[in-house]
Amino acid sequence: MKIPALRRRHYDTTALVLLVGLIVLWIPWLGDTPFYSKGEPREAVVAMSILHNGDWILPPVLGGEIPYKPPFLAWLIAIFAWIFNGGVVNEFVSRLPSAIAAIAMVMMGYRWGKHVQNKHFALTMALVTATSFEVFRAAEACRVDMVLTAAMVGAIYILYEIRERRGADNVGWYAAAAVLLSIATLTKGPVGALLPCLAVGIWRLLRGDNFWRVLGSLSLLAVVSLMLPALWYYAAWKRGGDTLIDIAWEENIGRLTGTMSYGSHVKPFWYNFLTILAGMLPWTLLAVLALFRARTYRHWPFRPAGLLAVTTALTVIIFYCIPVSKRSVYLLPAYPFMAYGVAVIIESLRGTASNRVFGHFMAFLAVACPVAIAAMDLFPLPALPHFALRHWWSWLMLLLPVAVAAWWYLGHPRSDVGMPCIWALLVAYNAVVMPAMFGNPLRSADDMARFEALRESRAKVYSLGTPNNLNVVYWFNYYLDDSVRLVPTPEAADSLPTGSTLILVNPADTARVHGFTFATITRNPDTRRPAIFATKK
């Protein structure tokens, strides 16, 4: 009997190489740098509270403060800590969800780009996305933004597939989109579901779809996507009561309408456009060079994918121009679609002087930057007294960009823009520069010794409340194992037990409390200003 031949599987080796490159870019270095601002430990300590208290619905921090965001990121951190680190939250597992989300988003973009254009274009778009500085840094931060962005962008890719591939199983595709939009909502709130639906709705109208059909299908999708988060909001409301409702309203509606009870990241209108120019580096430089070839773009075919990219990027940017509260990470969902435009520029200018000049400049930086970093370590600068290479292998990692630049230059690819050089520079940045610059967030050996003495003493630690309940001691709370407790007023601080420590973030508060001895830490990573350890006599 003749045995049928086994079907030969065709693997996409380009996708595999891309995946390995992304893993090397981010994963190995996630735990090398301690938290050095208040944002990362603020999120990590929620997961720490989950594991300490077993409360997966509304885990309290600082002894009772309700988290300001839904808990999906904290759930991921807690699960990863349980799987990979024996239930202990550290910097690596805290940043791992963001890195995985970034890798997934770039790989989804590669798949989408391959479908709408070709494999080479898809690789270019994927690498531009990963190496744009805003995406690069968000992928290794313990913040909600990258998980939110990956879920939103993935849902937009799926909704494109539904519209353009009419033979697809729409129910299954809609279900996948609903899951991603639910994740986005559970990460930061309803904007995670509503903004992608708005962007896709505008794109579909521009494609000539019936208004009522678009409104009906996307409204139904949004409602379905909000059902699972609604269950969490209800369960959290049962725990947190009106306080939770007030926080949710202020974070979602108040932030959008500018009616928050306190100022938060208040920036002018032009701030978003300035951050895009900075966040798209180094590709902003290529875009400037491409202006000299502007006549090349007059006859570009405006494909449906290109229309989606332009529509989504503009929708995100314009939407976040509305609130007075502006941050560069809010615009992250626009970056994969701006990367589509950069990839079009690169492909259209292949073999031109613009691409060659940009590629040679990146190769030059791949040599000059490691030399400069080595010089800063060997000949310390007064302006950077804390910069020091931490590991012997840091010197080897500094050679990586130099070796890649030499390989690229000797190959002299006329049509390339030096992407391997950019990748190698960013790997060296993660492996060498970040640990050297932020290895000691307190910046002083004396401050570190004082903090270690407090940690080893196991004294009870408290924080004096500030207006609007902005208790900026998240860094201290994380590294003190979520043991800091809130003292709402100076009068309450007077009754603290002897030997306890009160952390003051405002030097003027020393006059408001009595019976304490004071010691100053010259740099508080939460505020980037001094902090005072007040010890009860």
Image: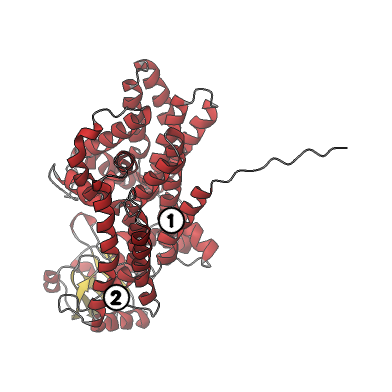
In primary-sequence order, the first of circles 2 and 1 is 1
The vertical placement of 494 against 269, above or below, is: below
Is 264 left or right of 57, judged from the image as shown?
Answer: left
Which residue is label 2 attached to? Answer: 440
Residue 134 image position (x, y, % from top left): 29, 52
Which residue occupies 40% across, 54% down? 98
Circle 2 SS class: loop
Residue 282 can be seen in this image: no
The vertical placement of 484 against 172, above or below, is: below
Quadrant of the frame with the C terminus: bottom left
* Cβ–Cβ under 8 Å for marks 2 and 1: no
Which residue is label 1 attached to? Answer: 22
Neighbourhood count class around disc 1 (C-alpha, 10 Å): few under 14, some 14–19, many 20 upward: many
From this viewpoint, which residue is outermost toward the right?
1
Which residue occupies 20% across, 48% down? 277
Is 220 left or right of 378, judged from the image as shown?
Answer: right
Instruction: Give the distance between the C-alpha atoms of the residues marked 2 and 1, in whole angstroms.
Output: 27 Å
The vertical placement of 20 against 317, above or below, is: below
User: Which amino acid, by three-letter code, is at mark 1?
Assistant: Leu
Question: What is the quadrant of residue 462 in the picture?
Answer: bottom left
**Residue closer to the observer: 482 or 448:** 448
Circle 1 SS class: helix
Residue 295 image position (x, y, % from top left): 20, 33
Quadrant of the frame with the N terminus: top right
Which residue occupies 21% across, 51% down? 278
Neighbourhood count class around disc 2 (C-alpha, 10 Å): few under 14, some 14–19, many 20 upward: some
Residue 514 image position (x, y, % from top left): 16, 76
Which residue occupies 32% across, 57% down? 137
Residue 431 image position (x, y, % from top left): 37, 68
Question: What is the quadrant of residue 288 in the picture?
Answer: top left
User: Which amino acid, by three-letter code, is at mark 2?
Assistant: Asn
